[in-house]
Image (cartoon, rainbow, N blue to C red):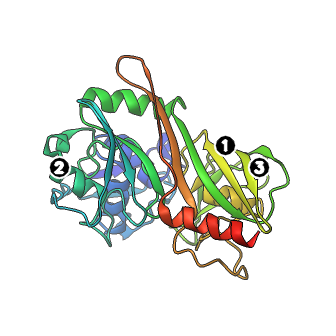
Amino acid sequence: MEFTISPQETKIRLDKFLVQKFPQYSRSWIQKLIKEALVLVNREKASPHYFLKENDKIEINLKKPKPISPQAVEGKIEIIFENRDFLVINKPSSLMVYSSQKNKRDTLVNFLLARYPEIKNIGPDKLRPGIVHRLDKNTSGLMVITKTEKAFKHLKSQFENGKIKKEYLVLVYGKVKEREGKITFPIFRSKKKGYKMVIRRFQDLVDLKAKPALTEFKVIKYFSSYTFLKVQIKTGRTHQIRVHFNAIGHPLVGEKIYKPRKLKTKNLERPFLHAHILGFYDLKGQWQKFKQDLPEELKKFLKNLEKDN
């Protein structure tokens, strides 16, 4: 299949252009096709972030996603609540939500399909059935999974319109001066390191790639060299909490990517980041709110800090 870029289609990112042409596919799937050279620009491999120019010739080979193999996932995934429309789980750290190039089997989606095969066609993306939001691989805590198409659209709309309550428990290095506040740096993907997100520090600088991001925080407790906080995100940007706190000079304890190189990290094998509270409206319009305490490894880490304090 081929396209020639018109003047009206210039300056659009390649992946966004193709998502507009093929709305039945997710952007991540389109990006995968581009990275596998199944999309060519002027007969050459291109980046998903390539900005189109007039008369560019796009060739695309659309291959159907391979079905996901249901299978048991190592470790127990706790079901907090379940009804006919959705379920709320406590996702453990180290578990990916859906497949990547490196990990195509040991994911939350594999677990869900093994236990709830009926959700395989829920939502537009067959690689992410029932998934309306995600947590990073090493983030633990509450997630809602939809079991019906009606619930999927209902919850997806709330996430897109900022009606969902998402509160996290976070431990950062240093003492955050303000007892409560907001972080508003826009966020975009690094050109040099595609896995990493970066902030736009100068708010008045026009940059179409930077997306608005809002993180609100409130201090729970100060330790000698750390701050324990509760954090709410009003936008759902990739790595938002990790990026924002590093930007204000307080990287998360256990963080491997978003921290100064010289910082000596505490012996914690994951970021201290836990999805503590999740709230949303069910299909009857009733507010549902769930709370999940810290996992044992994070509780133990806090207790050790209290001893040293």
Dot 2, how many residues are within 10 Å of its Cα: few (below 14), some (14-19), or many (20+)? few
Q: Which mark is residue 115?
A: 2
Amino acid residing under circle 1: Leu
Mark positioned earlier in the residue sequence (3 or 1): 3
Of residues 12 and 151, the one drawn nearer to the viewer in this rendering: 151
Tell which tag, 2 or 3, sits nearer the viewer.
2
- Residue 174 is situated, as x and y percent measured from the top left of the image, at 78, 66
Amino acid residing under circle 2: Arg
- Residue 171 is situated, as x and y percent measured from the top left of the image, at 66, 60
Of residues 67 and 13, the one drawn nearer to the viewer in this rendering: 67
Dot 1, how many residues are within 10 Å of its Cα: few (below 14), some (14-19), or many (20+)? some
Residue 276 versus residue 188 in the image, above or below: above
Tell which tag, 1 or 2, sits nearer the viewer.
2
- Residue 135 is situated, as x and y percent measured from the top left of the image, at 45, 53
- Quadrant occupied by the C terminus: bottom right
Q: Secondary structure at mark 2?
A: helix
Of residues 111 and 184, the one drawn nearer to the viewer in this rendering: 111
Write down the residue under mark 1. 214
Alpha carbon distance from label 1 to label 2: 36 Å
Alpha carbon distance from label 2 to label 3: 48 Å
Mark positioned earlier in the residue sequence (1 or 2): 2
Write down the residue under mark 3. 205
Q: Is residue 308 left or right of residue 115?
A: right
Alpha carbon distance from label 3 to label 1: 17 Å
C-beta proximity under 8 Å, tags 2 and 3: no
Residue 141 versus residue 261 in the image, above or below: above
